[in-house]
Image (spheres, rainbow, N blue to C red):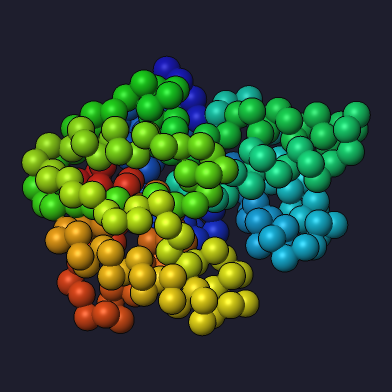
Amino acid sequence: MPKAQLFLTCLGDQFYTGTLQNMTRLLEQLGVELVFPAAQTCCGQPLFNNGFEDKTRAVALNFMRAFNQSDAPIIGPSGSCVSMVKHHYPALFQVGTPEHALALDISSRIFEFTEYLVHVLQVTDVGASYPHKVTYHASCHYLREMGLKTEAKALIHAVKGLNFVPLNEEDTCCGFGGAFTVTYPEVSRSMMENKVRNVIASGADTVITCEPGCLMNIAGGLQKAGSSIRAMHIIDLLASH
């Protein structure tokens, strides 16, 4: 039986506990034995993105020590947070130090949820059913930093009863970008409104994304526009029956 460690992420823990529960159930149904490192905290991305590398190192060390109690893969529901660990942790520590070696090891063992399903478990059909018209927003870090281009769609297309419709400018940023939405609110809002217009124009009744931040931003934009279109994390889609 494969083993894996659950990385909850801050937005998941604070706002999407149901999604995390669905992630746990799906992985267990697929035969994965799960471990939850209780000492885990934020991965440090907000600090890192705002230039506080010294403070990020302390957070990163706590994260790595928490997940180094096991050599099992680490699974997270966010391409953004997973990318932080995978692509930026090694650069935070000097080459040749134990911390750098640990960062390389941790970065080699962390996977975004859909990446783990498709490439490690080699599963695309989890038995989900969702008889609705669905479109898909490709999140920036998921697509560009993680390089995940086909994984989400492979899982979406395997859902029974689902009618997939393309989204114009699918891979254009929704404007969230973490601190970007606070630092440049006018630009962020314009990008979000453009994304919402495209989602509405698609004719879908549900928009799927793999990123909690994008999910929150697009859902808020749809609500503000008076739209009944539902924004949904891909994990919740895959848990539908």
Is residue 20 at all visible to an observer of this figure?
A: no
Q: Residue at x 28, y 35 (%)?
A: 155
**Residue closest to the far front:** 168
Is residue 116 at all visible to an observer of this figure?
A: yes
- Where does the image place residue 76, in percent across and percent down from the top left? 50, 43
Q: Quadrant of residue 180?
A: bottom right
- Where does the image place residue 33, in percent across and percent down from the top left? 44, 27
Residue closest to the eye, 93 or 24: 93
Q: Residue at x 52, y 76 (%)?
A: 187
Q: Count the numbered circles shown.
A: 0
Q: Quadrant of residue 68?
A: top right
- Where does the image place residue 226, in percent across and percent down from the top left? 22, 80
- Where does the image place residue 142, in percent across and percent down from the top left? 48, 45
Residue closest to the eye, 192 or 40: 192
Q: Residue at x 42, y 57 (%)?
A: 172
Is the residue 71 above or below the residue 58 in the image?
Answer: above
Q: Residue at x 17, y 45 (%)?
A: 164
Q: Where's the N terminus, which quadrant?
A: top left
Direction from residue 76 to residue 55 in the image, left or right: right
**Residue closest to the far top:** 1
Direction from residue 200 to residue 82 in the image, left or right: right
Direction from residue 225 to residue 188 in the image, left or right: right
Q: Where's the C terminus, which quadrant?
A: top left
Is the residue 217 above or below the residue 2 in the image?
Answer: below
Is the residue 64 above or below the residue 215 in the image?
Answer: above
